[in-house]
Image (cartoon, coloured by chain):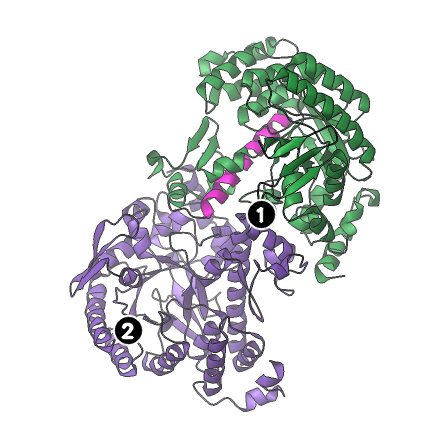
Chain colours: A purple, B green
Amino acid sequence: MCRLCRRFLRDLSSLSGIPSARRPARLNASRAVSYDSQYLGRYSQSGEEAGMGMVESAPGAFELIARDDVTRARRGTVHTAHGAVPTPVFCPVGTQATVKGLAPRDLLTLEAPMILSNTYHLYLRPGADLIGELGGLHRFMAWPGPILTDSGGFQVFSLEGLRKVDDEGVTFRSHIDGSEHRFTPEKVIEIQQILGSDIAMAFDECAKPHDRAYIAEAMRRTHLWAERCLAAHSRPDQALYGIVQGGVFEDLRAESARVLSEMDFPGYAIGGLSVGESKEDMLRILDHVVPLLPDGKARYLMGVGSPEDLVEGVARGIDIFDCVLPSRLGRNGAVFTPEGRINLRNAQFRDDPRPIQEDCACYTCQHFSRAYLRHLIISRELLAPHLNTLHNVHFLLNLMSRIREAIEGDRFADLRECFWAEYRPADEVARQRNHANYRRSTGPPEGAKNERKGRTHSERV
Amino acid sequence: MCRLCRRFLRDLSSLSGIPSARRPARLNASRAVSYDSQYLGRYSQSGEEAGMGMVESAPGAFELIARDDVTRARRGTVHTAHGAVPTPVFCPVGTQATVKGLAPRDLLTLEAPMILSNTYHLYLRPGADLIGELGGLHRFMAWPGPILTDSGGFQVFSLEGLRKVDDEGVTFRSHIDGSEHRFTPEKVIEIQQILGSDIAMAFDECAKPHDRAYIAEAMRRTHLWAERCLAAHSRPDQALYGIVQGGVFEDLRAESARVLSEMDFPGYAIGGLSVGESKEDMLRILDHVVPLLPDGKARYLMGVGSPEDLVEGVARGIDIFDCVLPSRLGRNGAVFTPEGRINLRNAQFRDDPRPIQEDCACYTCQHFSRAYLRHLIISRELLAPHLNTLHNVHFLLNLMSRIREAIEGDRFADLRECFWAEYRPADEVARQRNHANYRRSTGPPEGAKNERKGRTHSERV
């Protein structure tokens, strides 16, 4: 056993209050990395510490803490082998076993509850077997908290012209070197079991959202594959979630929700949204499909993560989100503020002494002016994507934290109204649509609650 | 006064043990940034805390703590308005107001005693006036510790074909947009005073080291300009160091050291080395020129920073070093180990579970395997240059820290021998030369001390 492993095991064993049954077997792998024990403590917390009665829950299980009485928003906990995840939650994306621009200790400081990584990318490079040999994905990337891996369905079906699908699986060519590979449901489960993520996803066919005939066929295959994924899955410390497909068609979505619900996954993702359809279609499908999913299971809206979509997704009953947006925007110089996105590359920020956001607690806003950040961007300095991404991820995690508090305090509808009064989405057309959708809302009608604050939306715009 | 400034002033005033006279005036600038007070504490420490009797020293003044009795190595303190700098010291380089790949908090965690930034680059982009308006360079880049700025001499004279020099100054074209600019000694001092660095450098002409006629002419101009820099310099919380030139010619170096010593700068740099001459020439010139400089002043070897050059520079009496090497190598996947450099891009590290260096305390080595770092490099991930640079800077700072302890404990000759027994420079020819030079050594002959350990150098190679 190497020096790092000995230290890691010592750190782990010194933690109190963690039932040994909650310690995942792979944390004892001989190459386990050393983490600061205060971090391990947080990520290994029991259900009790996470605000729940002490329950030895199955991996991926959802426990309800509170419901909003105006919308479908709900506050809960998703249990994993690497700790309890408070929901609703936003997961930063570490496609290639790293959240671009951030070190694991940055994510720990930001208190990211869970991150996402990609089966497709890790399978191609560096290879799942290598990660397995090196102790699994947590150890490989030195991330002690929960990890969700997508199944590669979205990536493989994005490879226009490079793939051939049949009922057995998909043959595709690597975007890196053109080499040919084949994914089957069994293969995708095998990879995710080797990676050792806390939540694995079933293999699905993610088709373009408007071609009904193709969507129906892809949905049928997704259901076949979901059963085969369930049959192939055997890792006891890992949850397997199913993925609902059906494009923008409400009847297909209903059928997909019904078929998958019968398979009794511990959680359900809604796939095939945020892939080119309008925001109106996305929210309409969410309004329609969420009520058809089992209430006691986690609901995960894949690939969604703009501030406005997080607020509206939560209002429609979504528990888990992930998106590359905060890091992708950060690399391009764009950062979130409560009023909307700004691009720091813009000349207007040349001599702006203010932080990105006056009341933000992140390291970037506590130390650096917009003028300095613009200088870094213009000078193509490595520090620019780091500081911008740090702020953007903090912004979304902080938004989700405020959303969770608001649901617990029965103030989510207020938060949602205040958000829309201030926030201007990047696309003004999208903003108007969102506003209209927000007015229509879901669940019990808003009313007394919003009047309570004595102001209307238009007053604050 | 903005929120950030209020917080900063509160943090500053809450520190105990800092005589108000040591608080630099510009820290009260209205746009001063907020820092964690524990960091401010370290960087505002008094001379007493830095191991010296309590002395209100002039900026840039050198105080001697200990001498090695075998070589010319010496342990001291350089006093600045932003804290005491323990010497010998290595300064990471933040050319464009950022050490590439590291945030200021990373440098604080690494306990970097001082950093260097570049007059030429900051003058061109974002402009000295802008940095001045935003509260000076420390505030702009959120670095609370000491900063040394070079004068731009090296950069301007590197612009082959883009410059025209006369006795009054240099006209040159920007490497960014080709625009024409002119540096005079007065201009270069004005820029550095606006930037507000703790140690400014006189404007010098850095000529190619082997053309004797040109070197003599450039040296004459450098001496003229040094007097004009002294006359132009007025900022009381900033030190101005002179730069000795003279190429690889011992008589010219001696003349330069004599002329500049008479001008009574608080510190002296040795410029025009590590610019293409052989290592043998560099060490020969150091052997010759250092004894000709005033013993009570700091000595700074510009642009030098490989591990072997640090050890040999210290042995020849150098107090201050700077180099882009740790960050430049880090961006290319090369990292330091006690045995020499390795390049993590190499296929041999594909499945290597070990950290870069087994006994290294840096964040990178405490958490990540060579296999993971190689994956990041191959995948062109932003985390790669960050983690590699973090290790490399830590490696050099740790080497300097061990060197300081060794000098204090009268063990520097041992450390130097152990270093050479283990470390293999990237260039084997250079290694042989260094070894020969090490055998010749400087100062009092080595002898009893090395025999004391009961082994010779060759036994350990």
Prevalent SS, magenta region: helix
* Residue assigned mark 2: A245
Q: Secondary structure at mark 1?
A: loop
Q: Amino acid at mark 2?
A: Gln
Q: Secondary structure at mark 2?
A: loop
Identify the residue at image location x=23%, y=66%: A230
Left or right: A178, with A135 as reference point: left
Residue A402 x, y percent position in the rendering: 54, 71
Q: Is residue B211 above or below residue B150?
A: above
Residue A74 in view, yes or no: no
The vertical placement of B206 against A86, above or below, is above
B410 left or right, relative to B260: left
Point out the stretch of residues depicted in magenta. B379-404
Q: Is residue B201 magenta?
A: no
Q: Is residue B402 magenta?
A: yes
Q: Is residue B3 left or right of residue B347?
A: right
Residue occupied by mark 1: B103
What chain letter is assigned to the residue under label 2? A
Front one among B456 and A423: A423
